[in-house]
Image (tube, rainbow, N blue to C red):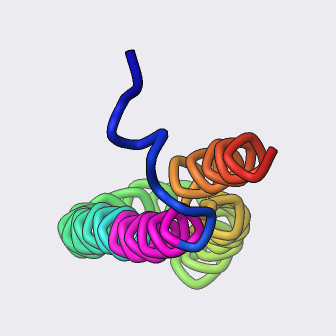
Amino acid sequence: MEHDHDKRSLGELFTELTHETRTLINQEIELAKTEISDKISRMTKDVVAIAIGAFVGYTGVLVLVAAIVLALGMAIPLWVSALVVGIVISGVGVFMLMKGIKDLKASRMTPERTAETIKETAKWAKAQMK
């Protein structure tokens, strides 16, 4: 029993393969766009959360710094107390800033799912050509 696809010419099969390949490539492009958009959306939310947290934390730290400076000022001159506290807090700030920059650089924008499906598509296309 012959199937309908057995009756098609080589030209028809090649045309169909070309059409299916174009469709597949368009779907891969859409997947890449969606995946990158999702990653950008997540990163934007993370950056906003970091900014809000930094602002709230900053105001709390200012009050704590004033309290520490005043407390140390009871034992040593107030200006020395402010200098010591300022140096310690600046060191902590630089450390946190460097860690944040390092972590942000480690974020990957590569659309991994799309790359994987492109590999699968290439394997499929090679199999169809045989």
- Could you tell me which quadrant the N terminus lies in? top left
Q: Which residue is at 62% across, 63% downward?
A: 10
Q: Is residue 123 magenta?
A: no
Taken as a whole, is the magenta stretch helix, strand or loop?
helix
User: For residue 85, what is the image quadrant?
Assistant: bottom right
In screen coordinates, is 102 left or right of 24? right
- In this view of the protein, which residue sits in the foreground, 72 or 105? 105
Q: Give the quadrant of residue 51.
A: bottom left
Q: Which residue is drawn at 56% across and 55% down?
A: 75
Q: Judge by depth and name the residue closer to the eye, 19 or 121.
A: 19
The residue positioned farthest toward the bottom in the image shown: 79
Q: In this view, does 127 lie above or below 9?
A: above
In this rendering, the answer to whether 105 lies above or below 129 is below
The picture places residue 60, in percent across and down from the top left corner, at 22, 62
Indicate the position of residue 36 as horizontal and vertical percent values: 41, 71
For this orientation, the residue located farthest to the front is 1
Asked if one can make out residue 56 in the rendered structure from this viewpoint, the answer is yes
Membership of 17 in magenta stretch:
yes
Q: From the viewer's perspective, tell me whether residue 120 is left or right of residue 72.
A: right
The answer to whether 86 appears left or right of 102 in the picture is: left
82 lies left or right of 91:
left
Q: Give the range drawn in magenta.
A: 12-31
Say which residue appears at 60% left-offset and 76% top-offset.
86
What residue sits 39% from the left and 76% below the top?
A: 26
